[in-house]
Every structure is written in C-alpha cells, then in structure tokens.
Amino acid sequence: MIDLGLVAERLINARTTLDLTQDEAAQRTGVSRSTIQRYEAGSPMDLVTLGRLLEGYDLVLTDVIGGQNDLAYLEAAIRRLGPNSCGIICGICKSLGWR
C-alpha cells in the first residue's frame, strides 16, 4: 500500500521547489487549490488529478509513489478506473517515460 503521507510530502516538496504557492500551483496545473490542499494533507487521490499535478510539476508517477516496487498499487488503481480508461492509462505510461 502507498503511504499517502509520503506522497503528500513529496507533492509539497515539488511545489515548493518550484517556488509555487498553492494558488499558483492551481493555475499552473488546472487543479483546484482545495484539491491541492487535500492532497498535501494526505487525503486519498485519484490518478487523473494526480497526473495533472505531476505534469504541472514536471514529475513522473514514481517520483511521488516511491519507486518501481509500487506496481501492485498501480494495478489496483488502474482496475478501479473502469472500462473507459485507455486515455488515462496512456497518460500514466507517458508520465513514466514510456513511448
């Protein structure tokens, strides 16, 4: 299982490394400030919104979830996306650097 507290910490570090306030991060990523606040507090996250944050922060998924050993988490998350998830899965693969 993924440590949401660790993911939150990594998202905060990424945002502050870019010298962005939460409002500026919201403008940059298209994710609402309230969602950024929730994610940075360690709330559960959905992959679509997390992907938008990662793209805006110039990160890949493994930068925030802890590395290659978290494939079971990714598999479970993809299964929850449902049958119309091709675009989302392609976005995840792109974020991982797969072409």
Image (spheres, grey):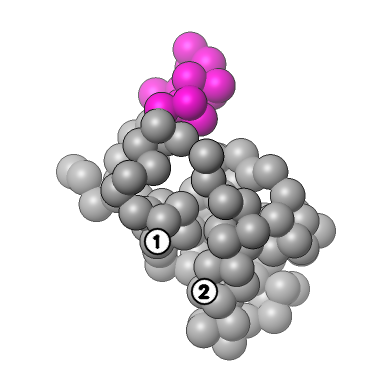
In the image, taking residue 61 as reference, residue 1 lies left or right, namely right
Which range is magenta? 75-88
Q: Residues within 10 Å of mark 2 (few under 14, many from 20)?
A: many
* Amino acid at dot 1: Asp
Up the image or down, 55 lies above or below 10; here it is: above
* SS at badge 2: helix
Q: Are marks 2 and 1 in contact (CB under 8 Å)?
A: yes
* Amino acid at dot 2: Ala
Q: Magenta stretch: residue 78 in it?
A: yes
Q: Does the magenta stretch mainly form a helix, a strand or a loop? A: helix
N-terminal of the two: label 2 or label 1? 2
Q: Residue extending furthest left?
A: 99
Q: Residues within 10 Å of mark 1 (few under 14, many from 20)?
A: some
Q: Magenta stretch: residue 42 in it?
A: no
For image coordinates 64% across by 59% down, the residue present is 5
* SS at badge 1: helix
Q: Which mark is residue 63?
A: 1
